[in-house]
Amino acid sequence: MDYPQYDPQLDTQALDDAELEALDDLLQALPGEEVMNVEALDGYLTALLVGPPVLARLRTADWLPQVWGGDGEGSAPFPSQKQRKRAAMLVLRHLHAIQKQLQGPPEDWQPVFSIAETDTGEWVDAEDWCAGFLQAAVLDSEAWGAFFDDPRWGPALVPVALLGGDGAGLSDADRARLADPKERDALSRAVVDLVLALQASRAPAVPS
């Protein structure tokens, strides 16, 4: 399928709650373990916007099908080309909405995190979101590697790596942090600070 190139100047309407839920349902109905949910998708798209400028270099077909685990024969993994086209257009609209939010006041940006209401308060968990963010980093691993190695950005990216990583090589202390809802909440909130700092810097490649 030929996907339209992302145009940041195109005026599109942000997805409302019903459309965002419909997109999540559409994706979760697909086969395969690599399909993103809407939280991972939100993190994936955000990383494309605040990290190295891959959107200017890659074709839409190079990054968009990653959302549903890659294209197969015919309309696969979708049951029809119509559904695949609908998913593509909803994702592109959500990408544009995130971009517009990030370009506005910091409070305008609302990441799609998991939130649990408990007797002790509201706990935020950005695990799936961070997993999506890291999937975007794979698209330009060399440039993102420079961010992870950078003395400023490396420590700020630790919450993303802890929450969204596969858990390999974690210390006992890190595993204990991830098992504590309070710590997960703190890590998740630190992710917000990271994204806003990246957006403010808009470093094109290797940070200085």
Image (cartoon, rainbow, N blue to C red):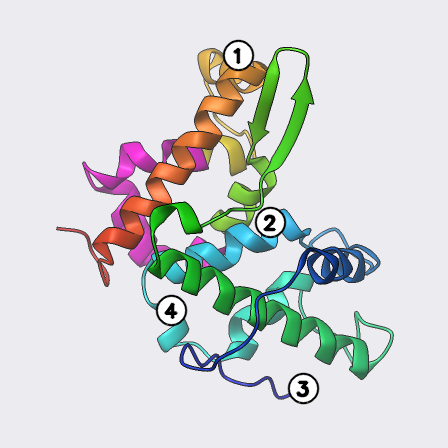
Say which mark, if any, is on residue 1.
3
CB atoms at circles 1 and 2 under 8 Å apart?
A: no
Which three-letter amino acid code belongs to the residue tagged 3? Met
* Secondary element at image label 3: loop
Q: Alpha carbon of mark 1 to alpha carbon of mark 2: how far?
A: 23 Å
CB atoms at circles 3 and 2 under 8 Å apart?
A: no
Q: Which residues are magenta?
A: 136-160
Residue 169's spot in the image, x, y percent? 48, 26
2 or 4: tag closer to the N-terminus: 2
1 or 3: tag closer to the N-terminus: 3
Say which mark, if any, is on residue 40.
2
CB atoms at circles 2 and 4 under 8 Å apart?
A: no
Q: Which residue is farthest bottom?
A: 2
* Secondary element at image label 1: helix
Task: Reply above or below: 194 against 206.
Answer: above
Residue 156's spot in the image, x, y percent? 31, 35
